[in-house]
Image (tube, rainbow, N blue to C red):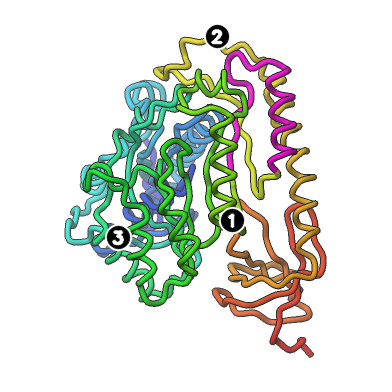
Amino acid sequence: MRTKSAKENKINVVTLGCSKNVYDSEVLMGQLKANDMSVSQDDSDGNIVVINTCGFIGDAKEESINTILDFVGLKERGEIDQVFVTGCLSERYKDDLEREITDVDQYFGTHDLPNLLKALGADYKKELLGERLTTTPKHYAYLKISEGCDRSCSFCAIPLIRGGHISVPIEMLVSEAGKLAKSGVKELVLIAQDLTYYGLDLYKERRLADLLRELAKVEGIEWIRLHYAYPTSFPMDALEVMRDEAKVCNYLDIPLQHSSTRLLESMRRGTTIEKTNALLARFKDMVPDIAIRTTLIVGYPGETEQDFEEMKDWVRTMRFDRLGVFSYSHEEDTPAFSLEDDVDEEVKQNRVNEIMEVQAQVSFELNQEKIGKVFKCIFDKVDDENFIGRTEYDSPDVDNEVLVSKDDYYISLGEFVDVEVVDAGEYDLYAKPLGKSKNR
């Protein structure tokens, strides 16, 4: 019989996947803290483990399953006492997981927070709505403005996992932003499955622009960043706010997925490459200094070598500021699952690599143009050699970094500093801060 570990009760929350999962874990941790329970993130001292899983695509599902198995192994060896699994993977595959990995104490879905808390011996406190224990550096935080998605993209399982779109009321988001600002947060990263749908369910019209205006009034908030917009029916008044309001970063994360109209139609994206290019041109007209981050899919069913070569040429031509690529994942219960997954996995990976080689050259050229220019940066962290920051055109963890030599200068983390770029690589800018004396 397995013995109980010698550790005192401490809950270790392990988060996998995207920033929406980070937010959800922070809400869970806030509830546990309010119940006077000891809780931490990715802490080996915890004897009770909660794994917040991702179930979006094949690689993410594999990582989640491997993580569950790793902690189950620790439980079997008596190094931890309990393992609970929540999040997207267990929402989508709960029955399968319960059959296949039986040593997990209990599985919960994406909307099971009260039940998860009960299993952990805590009460769900409704009065804490909008409050959480942030795990990001104290000067920035994610702000989830809606849950779920009403889109019907053929390749995407998110609506199956997260349900339909539900907006958080403006007044609640402004209140949450105010609390974050009082705790030292200076930058809000707005996240949702689709920012552009914000407000349709509550107000019967798109209200992203109104939300941005209200958030910009929050004292202490200096940057507001937009993640995960959909290109169809984009609310252009939000771009007007970006243009006119200094606090809204000239930055937009807008996954475009492909350059082939035929494949966009099969993907159910509701647009064409011509409309996409026109939209991007309109963005640049309204906010000439805007940085566009996008995501593409390679290897979607029916993608030919010609489709792929055209996408490579398109990436060269469009010169996106930031770009990421996924290989297509054939997901059951999605509309695309009825199509033949006819692109070989090795071919998919080669196409990912080729697109990223093109983007690396684009990024290098764009970064070379920044040498000699001055940018306002916020500094997130420090390593053995450098203070590491970002411009308004860079989001945490996924975009370019600004490096300032630790041997030459001192910068407080969370501080805004004007820097001059003195050199640049593919994804890093090397800079010297203005108005700061050299270390002696």
Q: Residue at x 62, y 77 (%)?
A: 417
Foreground residue among 256 and 189? 256
Q: Residue 8, located in which quarter of the rendered image?
A: bottom left
* Vertical side of 254 occupied by 62: above or below: above
Q: Residue at x 46, y 49 (%)?
A: 19
Give percent across and percent down for residue 13. 41, 51
Q: Classify 10 Å Cα crowding around label 1: few (below 14), some (14-19), many (20 and above).
A: many
Q: Residue at x 30, y 38 (%)?
A: 165
How far is mark 1 from mark 3, CA to CA?
Answer: 25 Å
Q: Earlier in the sequence, mark 2 or mark 1?
A: 1
Q: Provide the residue designation for mark 1.
A: 290
How far is mark 2 from mark 1, CA to CA?
Answer: 38 Å
- Report the magenta residues as a range: 294-318
Q: Is residue 71 visible?
A: yes
* Vertical side of 117 occupied by 129: above or below: below
In the rendered structure, find residue 205 and report the number of the disc placed on it: none
Q: Provide the residue designation for mark 2.
A: 340
Q: Classify 10 Å Cα crowding around label 2: few (below 14), some (14-19), many (20 and above).
A: few
Q: Earlier in the sequence, mark 3 or mark 2?
A: 3
Q: Provide the residue designation for mark 3.
A: 173
Q: Dot 3 lies on which element?
A: helix
Question: Contact (CB < 8 A) between labels 2 and 1?
Answer: no
